[in-house]
Amino acid sequence: MKIEKIRKICVVAFIVVGLACIFIEKANAPKEYTGVGDGFNDEITVTILAKKNSNGEVRISDVKYAHNDTQAIADPAIGQLITQLKATQDISKLDTIAGATYSSEGFIMAVEDALSKVEK
């Protein structure tokens, strides 16, 4: 009888620990933040996946965007800006891309808007 009681306690403890791990993982996972900026033709919407690290620095792990600017011009420029942003993790180091200035400015503005919403 004691072995059956110990077995039940172990199963319950395993379930509780498993649920706690899932909760902690979800609580510490990056969250989505959306920002908007003015592009050439219309607004540029950016959604970043970000969280603050233990030093209080915002770490961006993914960037998605939507726009109505000319795709052949805006997409390569925004792609380049995303690459730079992920590498440097610093919005102040981004500069507009020649030939896509308005799209670049709109993207940077949208990222700044999204970053302003990251929990403090």
Image: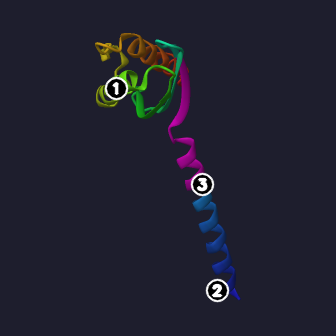
**Residue 45's x, y, as percent?**
53, 23
**Residue 57's x, y, as percent?**
40, 26
Q: Residue drawn 58% across and 61% down?
A: 18
9 on left or right of 73: right
**One can see residue 58 in this view:** yes
Q: Distance between the residues labelled 3 and 1?
A: 34 Å
**One can see residue 119 in this view:** no
Give the answer, above or below, for where 12 lies relative to 52.
below
Going from the N terminus, do you reach mark 3 or mark 2 first? Answer: 2
Three-letter amino acid code at the position of disc 3: Ala
Residue 35 part of the magenta-drawn span: yes
Three-letter amino acid code at the position of disc 2: Ile
Three-letter amino acid code at the position of disc 1: Leu
Give 21 or 70, whichever is nearer the viewer: 70
Q: What stretch is highlighted in magenta?
A: 20-36
Going from the N terminus, do you reach mark 3 or mark 1 first? Answer: 3
Q: Pointers 3 and 1 in contact (CB under 8 A)?
A: no
Q: Residue drawn 52% across and 41% down?
A: 28
For mark 1, give the secondary structure.
helix
